[in-house]
Image (cartoon, grey):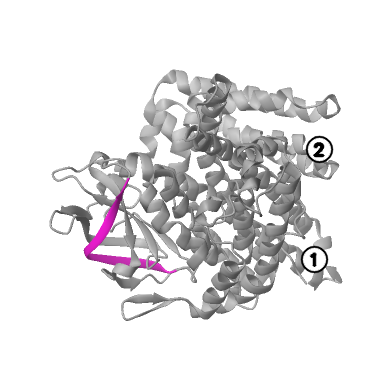
Amino acid sequence: MDNFFKDTPDFKFHLEHPLVQKIVKLKEHNFSESEKYDFAPLNHNDAIDSYNKILDIVGEICANTIAKNAESVDIEGPHIENGEVIYAKGTTENYQALYKAGLIGMALPRKYGGLNFPLLPYVMAAEMVARADAGFANIWGLQDCAETIYEFGSEEQKEKYLPRFNRDGATAAMVLTEPDAGSDLQSVKLRATFNEEKNTWILNGVKRFITNGDADISLVLARSEENTTDARGLSMFIYDRNNHAVEVRHLEKKLGIKGSPTCELVFKDAPAELVGKERFGLIKYVMALMNSARLGVGAQSVGIADAAYREALKYAEERAQFGKVIVKFPAVYEMITNMKVKIDALRSLLYETTSFVDISKVYEEVMKERKLEKEERMEMKAYSRLASVFTPLIKLMASETCNRIAYDSLQIHGGTGFMKDFPIERIYRDARITSIYEGTSQLQAVAAIKGVTTHVFLEQIKKYESEVSEENGLLKKKLQKMTDDYEAISKKIIEINNTELLDFHSRRLVEMAGNIIMGYLLVLNSQRDKKFNKSAELFLNLIQSENSEKYNYIANFEVENLELYKLEGFKGEEE
């Protein structure tokens, strides 16, 4: 019997990271809940054992249910009946399997029916689900919305909505974008007006590109303040599907992730509940929700990349040409080895980022019960800073690399990969969306550039550098040289003090930092487990050339060159 958890020992390795002990202790309130709940862990080892057992169940469901349904779901897809979404048969089977296993709302506190898991094992589960079927990962992963209700909702809202996830298997949706408000969410126009007579908020308008839009519980961004056009007029609301006041007008026909319904919704006097305070919808609540979603896309991207790599390896080991299997040709084994190396690097960055988010979030929970000590406040602030720039970094790096790995895997399959006979055709299509939704790669670079300008990336790189042992001296020297180049070129761009120039080079600078960070993480991994030695060495060879190319391009770029890229100059030539 296959199992996606057992065939990926890296999960257990990352659960053994030194930071995890701190996360678990804070999340479990120093294990005090064992007195109230029979299934709460007694100590750290008990908690890790619980995570491993649950992830083992997820791995089995992924391998034996979700992955096996992926092809039929891709063919059948969802459809609309009487204004409501009907999932593909396999999608319903997938969700029921996870629901029966108690894996809906797994990160919620136990008082609301959850498992009180940190983000780390939850994100690992998300990676496995995405490896099985990237489209279904969206439906299951939108339980992130429950976290937002828990974080910002009233006590009454928490009691009303949160138990439904585990108890009823409730589905969720982020209802944000509109026909004229995609990345520019401050342009949202869907109206929210307070009805004095009914003592409730009423929503009217249209939303578009809504993943799982016909969900049981939706978080809706709407304009609550009249005569406003910016973010300050937006609030967040909970819409309950049981009110039957939203019509699914259209399902998008998509390139990939076909099992995940992407809806156009029409709100017609739909009753809704305000989350938190008015005017904070975009600037606080949606930003928190989007950061969780971006971490989720990071996990989804790593899962897709892993699926593509495994398909490439399997095919190359079986396909013979010119008298031998193609995995023995240098042109092929180089590609496959680089896939594995990059996945090791991405997975390290994914779980490092998740740990940063975990610590900052658990401290926020602790603050609800007691005042933080000075050292704890400083630690919370430090990890929050890291989380804020590492989250767009992992979304950028993972989604772009995922697309490259899917591309190379299809290439290894040759003409057969272009046919629907092999899973890589679906995986390749599914990969494409990862660098688009929850903020395009271009927007992630703009968000992550703060890690460059505020020196957060550089400070963390220096911290990693100090942890490298003497036996890794040669690898350390390579990374130090790359760090010196990164520090020098980023300083040069920052000192020019030209916003347009910084934006122009933002992706190059962020990717240089990301490569160095992943390089250090692999070296540090190798100090805990020798199996990462090869990946660390090969990854450094790859990023040396990548970073050198970026450095040379930026170093030889003059500010005046920006004018050459502006499209206005082509109009006259076309005429």
Q: Residue 468: x, y in percent?
A: 77, 27
| Nearer to the camera, 175 or 297 | 175
Asked if the magenta segment contains residue 262, the reply would be yes
Q: Which residue is mark 1?
A: 326
467 relative position to 105: left or right: right
Q: Residue 543: x, y in percent?
A: 67, 38
Q: Which residue is mark 2?
A: 528
Among the two numbered marks 2 and 1 on one chain, the one whose residue lies closer to the N terminus: 1
For residue 537, say whether it is visible.
yes
- Total label count? 2
Asked if the magenta segment contains residue 502, the reply would be no
Q: Residue shown at 54%/19% (left/top)?
A: 374
Badge 2 local density, few (<14 within 10 Å), some, or many (20+)?
A: few
Q: Nearer the viewer, mark 2 or mark 1?
A: 2
Q: Residue shown at 46%/65% (left/top)?
A: 170
The range drawn in magenta is: 261-275
| Nearer to the camera, 473 or 274 | 274
Q: Secondary structure at mark 2?
A: helix
Q: Residue 169: x, y in percent?
A: 50, 67
Q: Secondary structure at mark 1?
A: helix
